[in-house]
Image: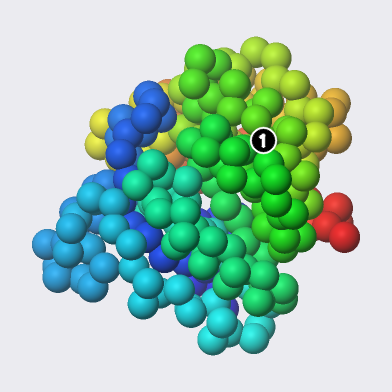
Amino acid sequence: MKKTKIEWTEETWNPTTGCTKVSSGCKNCYAEVMANRLKAMGTPGYENGFDFSVLPERLDQPLKKKKPTKYFVNSMSDLFHEQMPEEYLNKIIDVIKQTPQHIYQILTKRENRMYDYFLDKDIPSNIWLGVSVENKADGLPRINKLRNLNASIKFLSVEPLLEDLEYMDLEGIDWVIVGGESGVKARPMKEEWVLNIKKQCQDQDAAFFFKQWGTWGVDGVKRSKKVNGRLLAGKTFEEYPESLVV
């Protein structure tokens, strides 16, 4: 049973929580708002709000589940955050190695640390590595770091999409997720920006997944993201790269 509202995964696993902002894509961070709300509610693991925190009591969560599951790792943090101790990062990777039945989707905005960490290591085949691509200045350079790592699946989370990315070199990229921003202060996304990415995925053999319009609809009207929905050109696009996994 799916245990998260994130459309492209099944469960989340947060062995750390909290983060710090590194680019314009972080401006209206959903995780920060949620972490502060959970702190106010007294939820375990969020005593420090959105300050980076290590939670070793959560390390064994995937070990308790035999059913193959897609885990989004650190939906409330960044696995390659500057304050992540390498010893603890190694323990997280060890859990991944011990549970080959699961798929672990790891997404980061800290591509340099991700690259340096995995450069001299064999990346477990059940890890899907991804980077965020919100705009040309901050996002596009991350793709080159990702492209040069030997992960079984390499993906992009183009969310929130803040501008027309124009040309994207998708060589070595298996999967592209696109979505608009949510929340009271959300920035709008234009349909032509999304359709441009969709065409490039088709031309360069990358799977395309349209996640949401977010707070701004295709018609440029601000409303509930649920009302705005997930249709692009009248269709739902939920392509996965799973056929590419060996």
Query: Could you tell me which residue is drawn at 29 percent across and 51 percent down?
Result: 52
Residue 227 location (% of width, % of height): 42, 46
Residue at the (54%, 33%) spot, across then down: 112
Up-down: is 186 above or below 71? Answer: above
Tell me how the rendering is colored.
rainbow
What amino acid type is highlighted by mark number 1? Leu
At 35% from the left edge and 47% from the top edge, which residue is drawn?
A: 83
Res 195 → quadrant: top right
Q: Secondary structure at mark 1?
A: helix
Task: Report the number of discs.
Answer: 1
**Where 193 sits versus 146, above or below?**
above
Give x and y (percent) for residue 13. 47, 66
Viewer-side residue, 185 vs 18: 18
What residue lies at 68% left-to-right and 26% top-to-bottom?
144
Q: Is residue 245 above or below residue 137?
A: below
Badge 1: few (under 14), some or many (20 or more) residues near its Cα, within 10 Å?
Answer: many
**Quadrant (top left, top right, bottom left, bottom right) of the N terminus:** bottom right
Quarter of the image holding residue 15?
Answer: bottom left
Q: Quadrant of the C terminus?
A: bottom right
Residue 39: x and y in percent read 16, 62
Q: Between 130 and 224, which is closer to the camera in this rendering?
A: 130
Residue sticking out furthest to the left: 40
Across and down, in percent, residue 161 comes to 50, 28
Q: Nearer the viewer, residue 175 or 93?
A: 93
Q: Which residue is mark 1?
A: 146
Residue 232 seen from this side: yes
Front position in the image: 97 or 221 = 97
Residue 234 visible in the current orientation: no
